[in-house]
Image: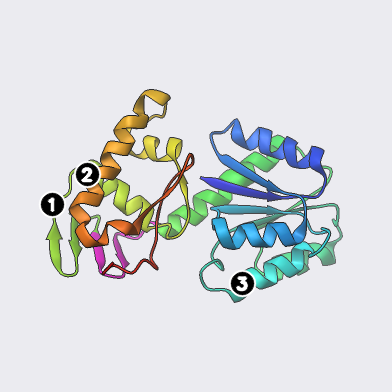
Amino acid sequence: MQILVVEDDVDIAELVAFNLERQGWACSLAHHGTEGWELIQRQRPDLVILDGMLPGMDGMEILRRMKEQETISGIPVIFLTARGALEDRLDGLSLGADDYVSKPFSPKELVLRVRNVLARSNAGASQLVVRRGAFVLDKNILAATLAGKPLDLTTGEFKLLAYLMERPGKVQGRAELQNILFGYADTTQSRALDTHVKRLRQKLGSHAACIGTERGVGYYFNPDTDNEN
């Protein structure tokens, strides 16, 4: 899971990232509203922790813009802000925020809220039949087709493709993908993960570019790839 923390107070941002990374989640930081907005569009993280008061562009404006763009409108957002008044909480929630945490805050409580929001988000993404462009995956029977033709995938390849397809455009970290494939993550599994991706791409043929690489981070499913190239 990739979490973006948009917080102008460097100490708070690093405290949040430290506690989230201890749970195995990958974190990136932005300390300016405009920078945070650009990273949201580029990274498409699994969750955004958003300060309400930011230089350049405040958190409310960032959330408004997110909800206006279909490709990122579904990314869950937790507000983490000193604006604790009831009106501020209602404004954030009415714009579509998934949760609202007031400063000062407990890191343990924030971790719990992040876990709950991610669980709800993943539950919504885990439909039994997944369709993306020419791909159709039926998780009931572990069957995959591409442009109407069956794909002969191993169980591991199917799980990997399904996981990426359910999160289009979002880079999934290597540790997260190792957990999906092997049930745990460590450096000895890195080559095995890369082998799975290589074999999956071979089976996708001219559609292989749909599995993108973020060097040093992980892999993602690119729904916008021109499959004929």
In the structure shown, which secondary structural element does the residue marked by tag 1 occupy? loop
Q: Which residue is mark 1?
A: 152
Amino acid beneath label 3: Lys
Q: Which residue is at 53% across, 34% downward?
A: 24
Chosen colour scheme: rainbow
Residue 64 lies left or right of residue 184; in this view the side is right
**Residue 151 appears at what percent x and percent y?**
15, 56
Q: Which residue is at 54% across, 65% downward?
A: 74
Toward which corner of the image does residue 13 lie, by quadrant? top right
Residue 210 lies left or right of residue 26; in this view the side is left
Give residue 199's mark: 2
Residue found at the very far front of the displayed protein? 229
Toward which corner of the image does residue 149 lie, by quadrant? bottom left
Looking at the image, residue 218 lies above or below residue 88: above
Separation (CA) of disc 3 from disc 1: 38 Å
In the structure shown, which secondary structural element does the residue marked by tag 2 occupy? helix
Amino acid beneath label 1: Asp
Query: Sequence order check: which comes first, mark 3 or mark 1?
Result: 3
In the image, 222 versus 128, the foreground residue is 222
Amino acid beneath label 2: Arg
Q: Nearer the viewer, mark 2 or mark 1?
A: 2
Residue 184 lies left or right of residue 18; in this view the side is left
Q: Nearer the viewer, mark 3 or mark 1?
A: 1
Q: Which residue is mark 3?
A: 67
Looking at the image, residue 49 lies above or below residue 85: above
Separation (CA) of disc 2 from disc 1: 11 Å
Q: Which residue is at 28% across, 67% downward?
A: 227
Q: What segment is highlighted magenta in the picture?
A: 126-137
